[in-house]
Image (cartoon, helix red, strand yellow):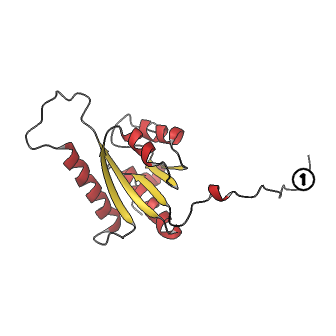
Amino acid sequence: MSDTPVTDYPAVESEDRIHPGGRIVVGVDGSAASFSALRRGARIAESLGCSLVGLTVWEYPQAWPGYMIDGWSPEADAEAIAENAAEEVFGSAVPSWYSTVVRSGSPARQLIAESEGAEMLIVGSRGLGGFTGLLLGSVSRSCAEHADCPVLVIHGKEAVLKH
């Protein structure tokens, strides 16, 4: 083996790049990790001239008995989470290149569906549910395995520190 470094890298395909004007999707669930993911997404989108979509997904709890709790709406909660995240990250001046989408269903399935045609999907490593201490939550793991675009998983100190 030679001590000479290899410098003949294959040419980068244009499909391997994030295209200006493309769409970046961020999973937003109200957790500190999702706020960090949204902050990172905003920096990337702004620097690359992309639009940014904050996707918040709601579903009825698994133990849902089939009747509504008076005055409670999981969809309204999800919309409030989306609004709060935008305010937390952008303040009162939400940029025109940012939009929110609120959907019902499985968070992993909805994020994977939204990744179709996106330049990048960004998620926090741990959301609001699950077991503390796992490196990846079930949603971030599913997205990393099945998304239609590159996935950036935000974890570690960035997920708890405000930038």
Q: Is residue 119 left or right of residue 83?
A: right
Q: Tag 1: residue type? A: Asp
Query: Can you see residue 81?
Result: yes
> Is residue 157 positioned above or below 95 on the image?
above
Query: Can you see residue 161?
Result: no
Residue 130 placement (x, y as % from top left) = 36, 35
Q: Nearer the viewer, residue 158 or 121?
A: 121
Q: How many marks?
A: 1
Q: Nearer the viewer, residue 139 or 135?
A: 139
Q: Is residue 11 left or right of residue 87?
A: right
Furthest residue to the left? Answer: 70
Q: Quadrant for the C terminus, please.
A: bottom left
> Is residue 72 positioned above or below 92 on the image?
above
The residue at 33%/38% (across/down) is 129
Q: Label 1: which residue?
A: 3
Residue 55 placement (x, y as % from top left) = 36, 51
Residue 116 placement (x, y as % from top left) = 48, 48
